[in-house]
Image (cartoon, rainbow, N blue to C red):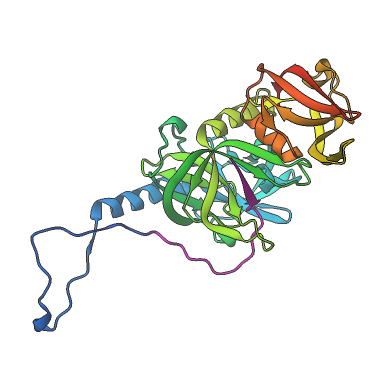
Amino acid sequence: MEFPARRLAPAVAVAVLLALSACTSSKGGGSAASSDQGTAAPAPSVSNDLQTDYENTVRAVLPSIVQINAENSLGTGIVYDTKGDIVTNAHVVGTATSFQVLLSDQSNALSATLVASYPANDLAVIKLKNPPAKLTPAVFGDTSKVDVGQIVLAMGSPLGLSSSVTQGIVSATGRTVSEGKSEENPQGTTIPNMVQTSAAINPGNSGGALVNLSNQVIGVNTLAAVSNGESGAQAPGIGFAIPASSVTDLADQMIKYGKVVDSGRAALGVSVRTVIVTNSNGSQTSGAGVVTVTSGGPADKAGIQPGDVITQVDGSTVDSSQALSTVLATLKPGQQVPVVYLRDGASKTVQVTLGTLS
């Protein structure tokens, strides 16, 4: 399923509510005052155990959350190791290569430089030039153990308010979510296996942490869903985070090699745009029009050429460039799949062995 979404890096200085809500419990053994006594029943007591869990998690993880200023954007990052590496969203860093980082203790801003950016999964790593001696790296959890209904906290810098925390639950897992086009990624981005959460995620939260009550980062906050109406307003209570397993896999590669060498994501080796073709009978077909083909890539080896219009991949309809990205996000490199395309009004089908998205 594809969701419209909005990136969240830019922020403006306006007021925001920092909410840490606690569950209430009503324990047996007592009774409310009777109505003829004229006194109100006592308020439900707060569950001290859950309250303590919230507070302990905030104390444990918030020192790992930083604010990032990158030219004209502001976002959040997560301390990844004691060497000063910080993971964030690619759309937070944009095209910048130098940054100012504010640690959670509100000390003076520290300078950082870009290690690598991977817009295809909207992840990036930056590094502090002179990391302090006592950095607190975050602990990343096991994505396979993330379940719907788990309580989570979103930590970041919404609207420029650093070290803010909101609370919610894991609403769903395995979502495939699409971002719009950007300067660093002209074709847009489709990210698979995202964690959906009801915790409030606002502009400036991008690159921040989605955290469980075991003090583990289970995702990097990235997107908020938007309505399909003309306003495109942000949909409250529907946010998305890149799963921890993807974050650690890609971040480790960027730190070691300066780039992602094995994304684990499938690619056709083409650049495309949405087109509408008028058929000989007057009907119209929309698809992903091939603009360029990577020499020696999967599509090139299968005989696909610029000007062809891809209409189906592995049995799934492709009626736009975004639809092609969404289908490929569900597949793996090395898979052999049928690809249907139009050329000069005729439909053709070829078998393509998918490559790796770079």
Of 199 and 236, nearer the camera is: 236
In percent of width and height, residue 110 lies at 62, 49
| Image position of 155 (left or right of 37) | right
In percent of width and height, residue 84 lies at 58, 38
| Magenta run includes residue 302 | no
Q: Quadrant location of residue 302? A: top right
Of 300 and 214, nearer the camera is: 300
Q: Quadrant of the C terminus?
A: top right
| Image position of 278 (left or right of 116) | right
Tell me the chief SS of the magenta region. Answer: loop
| Image position of 165 (left or right of 33) | right
| Magenta run includes residue 16 | yes
Of 289 and 162, nearer the camera is: 289
Q: How many marks?
A: 0
Of 119 and 237, nearer the camera is: 237
In percent of width and height, residue 194 lies at 54, 39
Q: Quadrant location of residue 108? A: bottom right
In percent of width and height, residue 291 lies at 87, 33
Q: State which region is magenta.
A: 1-20
Residue found at the far front of this picture: 281
| Image position of 90 (left or right of 340) | left
Residue at position x 42%, y 52% in the image: 168
Residue at position x 73%, y 56% in the image: 72
Q: Quadrant location of residue 247? A: top right
Residue 117 visible (yes or no): no
Residue 203 visible (yes or no): yes
Q: In which quarter of the image is the N terminus?
A: top right
